[in-house]
Image: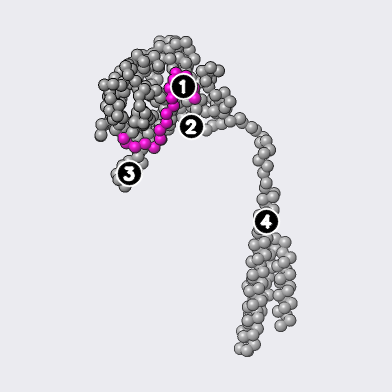
Amino acid sequence: MTDLNTLESDVLAQVAGAADLQALDAVRVAALGKTGSISGLLKTLGAMSPDERKERGAAINALRDRVQSAITEKKAALEAAELDARLARETLDLTLPGPYRRKGSVHPTMQTMDEIVSIFAEMGFAVAEGPDIEDDFHNFTALNFPEKHPAREMHDTFFFNRKEDGERMLLRTHTSPVQVRTMVSEKPPIRIIAPGRTYRVDNDATHTPVFHQVEGLVIDKGIHMGHLKWTLETFLARFFETDAVTTQFRPHHFPFTEPSAEMDVQCDRSGGEIKIGQGTSWLEILGCGMVHPNVLRACGIDPDEYQGFAFGVGVDRLGMLKYGMPDLRDMWSSDSRWLAHYGFSGFAAPNPASGLS
Ligand code: PHE
């Protein structure tokens, strides 16, 4: 029996002394491997008498189990030590300055949004918001899009899968549903703008699947197209930081306004870039019109008592025009060089008193 005790204390000492996983594995192979010392002992059992084999076999197997569990335990300890060492070795001090520091900046779209909001806020408009995920009622039906009307298809809508009750939610195709939400929840007079993200299945140099609009809505007694035109011209002159802009209404169709128009602003395209407030060209800039009586009715407002106007402006497009960015897709590329060039300081919140841009 002494040989077993000696062997065990030998092997256990080697296990305890193994400096790393590789050394430990060598110990394991030398003891428990095919030609290992303990495996060798097990092979001698065949030549023994049954009585001897019973006693000796049990002893050797118990020895093997103890060695095996010592190795398993040591392995876990070595792995933990190795991980600790690696964590210590690879520690990064994140408070140290990197080799190159780029300051964060406000994205031109958000800057444009802030400018638009600040101009309308000064003109007495409140900011309203609505969800990006809309239902058919707010995005279409209440806005006087008849069931199965082709205009619904024209909007290239992103639809969600139908719910159990058959209803299909969608990503709002415009900010106009916020008109509906506001008229349903507030009593006239109403004077709001609604900035936000909008979504359409569309992707080229002048369209991205996500874009931004600002909706405007005014509801009161005796509102007419003249109010609309003055509001938009005043806004555009302030936005483009010129004394005055010249605009024209072009007849158009939207189901939710009657009459409907697109507004063009006079500009100069002669020098390769577009200059607003001068020149002989026209640039389409927004959609607008007088709120359709059906929309007022759908929202519980009596069209014989109240009238209103609405407009929708593409924010990304206005920003591109003002800041001379040629390709809409760059706005989404997250290229830090582009952001460093076109971005704005986060400390210079635009307002009409201290300057817009
Ligand atoms: N919702 C329209 C669009 O996205 C724009 C619009 C808004 C037109 C309000 C008229 C009135 O094209």
Q: Give the range drawn in magenta.
A: 114-137
Q: How far apart are marks 2 and 1 (CA)?
A: 28 Å
Closer to the chain start, of discs 4 and 3, is 4
Which three-letter amino acid code belongs to the residue tagged 3? Arg
Q: Residues within 10 Å of mark 3 (few under 14, many from 20)?
A: few
Identify the mark nearer the N-term, 1 or 3. Answer: 1
Q: Is mark 1 on a helix, strand or loop?
A: helix
Residue found 35% across the figure and 22% down from its top: 219
Residue 165 in picture, x, y percent from top left: 30, 45
The answer to whether residue 252 shows anywhere in this view is no
Where does label 1 land, which residue?
121
The residue indicated by pointer 2 is 332
**x and y percentages locating residue 83 in the rendered image:** 66, 55
| Label 3 residue SS | loop
Q: Which mark is residue 8?
A: none
Front position among marks 2 and 1: 1
Q: Quadrant of residue 49?
A: bottom right
**Which is in the foreground here, disc 4 or disc 3?**
3
Task: Decide which of tag 4 and tag 2 comes sooner along the chain.
Answer: 4
Give the mark, 2 or 3, whose residue is nearer the N terminus: 3
Q: Do the residues under discs 2 and 3 have CB atoms within 8 angstroms?
A: no
Q: Is mark 4 on a helix, strand or loop?
A: helix
Does residue 135 appear in this view?
yes
Pointer 3: what residue? 162
Q: Is residue 116 magenta?
A: yes
Quadrant hosting residue 201: top left
Few, some or many C-alpha atoms within 10 Å of disc 1 (few <14, some 14-19, many ≥20)?
A: some
* 8 w.r.t. 245: above or below: below
